[in-house]
C-alpha cells in the first residue's frame, strides 16, 4: 500500500535547493567557452565536406570519366574520407597538451 507524502515539506526542500543553486549560478557561468578559431575550423571543414565530394563527382563525371558515374562516386567517397581524416588530424594537433610542446622543444 502506498503511503502519503506531505507536499509542503517537499516544496520547501525544493525551494531551498533552488535558492542555493541561484546563489552559486550568479557567480559562475555554466556555458562553455568555445574559441573562435575552433568555430572557424568547424565551419571550414563543414563547407569542405559539402563542396569537396560534390565538386569531385561532377568534375570526374564531366571531364575525367565520361558517363562513368561509378568511378566518379568512388572518387567522391575518397574525397569525403580525405576531408574527414584531415579534420581528425587538425583536431588532434589542436588538442596537444602544453607539456608535450615543452618536451618537443627540449
Image (spheres, helix red, strand yellow):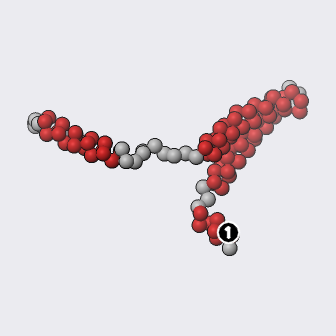
For image coordinates 80% across by 34% down, the residue present is: 56
Place of residue 41 in the rendered image (x, y in percent of width and height, measured from the top left):
66, 43
- Tell me if residue 43 can be seen: yes
Considering every residue shown, the one lying at the far front of the view is 27
Image side of residue 68 versus residue 106, left or right: right
Place of residue 99 in the rendered image (x, y in percent of width and height, measured from the top left):
59, 67
- Taking depth in this image into account, of 33 and 51 the one nearest to the observer is 33
Place of residue 52 in the rendered image (x, y in percent of width and height, measured from the top left):
75, 36
Place of residue 86 in the rendered image (x, y in percent of width and height, measured from the top left):
71, 48
Task: Tell me if residue 29 comes above or below residue 97 in the rendering.
Answer: above
Viewport quadrant of the N terminus? top left
For image coordinates 65% across by 38% down, the residue present is: 43
Q: Quadrant of residue 69?
A: top right
Considering every residue shown, the one lying at the far bottom of the view is 106
For image coordinates 71% across by 43% down, the residue present is: 83
Q: How many marks?
A: 1
Viewport quadrant of the C terminus? bottom right
For image coordinates 26% across by 42% down, the residue present is: 19
Amino acid at each position: 500500500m502506498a503511503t502519503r507524502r506531505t507536499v509542503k515539506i517537499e516544496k520547501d526542500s525544493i525551494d531551498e535547493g533552488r535558492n542555493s543553486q541561484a546563489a552559486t549560478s550568479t557567480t559562475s557561468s555554466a556555458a562553455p567557452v568555445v574559441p573562435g578559431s575552433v568555430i572557424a575550423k568547424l565551419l571550414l571543414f563543414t563547407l569542405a565536406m559539402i563542396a569537396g565530394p560534390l565538386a569531385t563527382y561532377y568534375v570526374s563525371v564531366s571531364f575525367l570519366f565520361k558517363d562513368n558515374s561509378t568511378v566518379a562516386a568512388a572518387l567522391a567517397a575518397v574525397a569525403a574520407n580525405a576531408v574527414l581524416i584531415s579534420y581528425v588530424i587538425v583536431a588532434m594537433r589542436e588538442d596537444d597538451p602544453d607539456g608535450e610542446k615543452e618536451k618537443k622543444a627540449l
